[in-house]
Image (tube, rainbow, N blue to C red):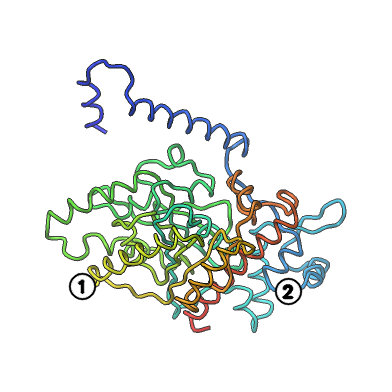
Amino acid sequence: MEVMSALKAVAPNHPPSAADRIARHAEILSSQLRSMRDAMFPPTAQKTLRSFSSGEVARFVGVSDGYLRQLSLDGLGPVPALSGGGRRSYSLEQVNELRRFLSGHRPKEALSFLPRRREHEKLQVIAVANFKGGSAKTTSSLYLAQYLALHGYRVLAVDLDPQASLSAMFGHQPEFDIGENETLYGAIRYDGDRRSMREVIRPTYFDGIDLVPGNLELMEFEHETPRAMMQGGRGKDVFFRRVAGAIAEVEADYDVVVVDCPPQLGFLTVGALNAATAMLVTIHPQMVDVASMSQFLLMTADLMSVIEDAGGRLDLDFVRYVVTRHDPNDVPEAQIVALLRGLFADDVLAATAWKSTAIANAGLTKQSLYELDRGAVGRSAYDRALDSMNAVNGEIEGLIGKAWAR
């Protein structure tokens, strides 16, 4: 910032440059986005989560709606809110309270009600990666984190993308709401201003999910790492162990960490892969995306070979390709999905995330389908889209359970 100020001070008085115009456009857009956010979530401009019907809660928890009704009549468990028509609804906090009640009330089924990892089960760190834009990487990260939280897991979402789309979906506008040293950069930087991981984690409105937000500050790690490596004396821990080290500080607090990686193979992504126990590669079934993924995989393999030679590790319980934004009625897309399955077999998830106007329309208000009522985007479109996302994330949940030998 001092360099920028000095340059401005000595700059001749010329008409606005292209850089000035772009900066002004960024300022205008940021101001407008903030106004929209304030209007959308008044009066505190903070996102909140809707309540869930007893039918939804029954599906999340794995019991019948009638059983929930009987618990309510018997005065057991959390007290649901009652509408004028006698319909029962629960906040997500109450859903988790219900899970704790049931795990104690029916101990033989405790793990199904509260599927948190046990002491001998390692933290699952899932890196969601691809450097091709439009592959639904952030959408996949968001829906996975929320799905797991709805099913009783303690989740940490880490936004490693300087564009910070995941942070925005959790209600944080990066340039206004996330200050200096409040991203993961604060916990992995090289100088004396480094903070503990706990200091950069913030709770979210979605009970069960904490967030390490992102913004443009993350780029500092990409700039500083080459300088730190040239200084010497830091050895193999100079960069690729730092993300893993930060996550290890809070390992006891979570079951799953979902990392939304940057759309390039820089130092941040390499650090995330070194910390990961699993990797999801999102792929839109178009030939240009498949070709891009080929380059991504080649570069990833080369980089990780170098890291492993330097003492790093790529110890992954599973790698899966997630087909996203898929139109099952599109013949060319079906051919590409068949090609991927022919090449990678079971490494491609059986379920695909369907292309849906319901998901797109929900995203316009920075929400997921889990946050919207069915009628908000059309019941039929809502059900189809949510079924596809649940199928994808249910497979991933199964892989997590398999890694824990459940």
Question: Eyeballing the image, is 367 above or below 34?
Answer: below
Question: Eyeballing the image, is 231 above or below 405?
Answer: above
Residue 254, percent across and down? Answer: 47, 66
Residue located beneath label 1 in the image:
309
Residue 89, percent across and down? Answer: 75, 58
Residue located beneath label 2 in the image:
63
Q: In this view, does 216 lie to the left or right of 391?
A: left
Camera-nearest residue between 340 and 162: 340
Q: Is residue 191 left or right of residue 117?
A: left
Tell which circle, 1 or 2, labels the residue nearer the N-terminal end: 2
Q: In this view, does 295 lie to the left or right of 252?
A: left
Camera-nearest residue between 50 and 358: 358
Farthest right residue in view: 85
Which amino acid is tagged 2? Answer: Val
In the image, what residue occupies the spot 75% across and 68% down?
A: 76
Count how many numbered circles sit on residues in the image.
Answer: 2
Residue 189, percent across and down? Answer: 27, 52
Which amino acid is tagged 1? Answer: Asp
Camera-nearest residue between 49 and 128: 128
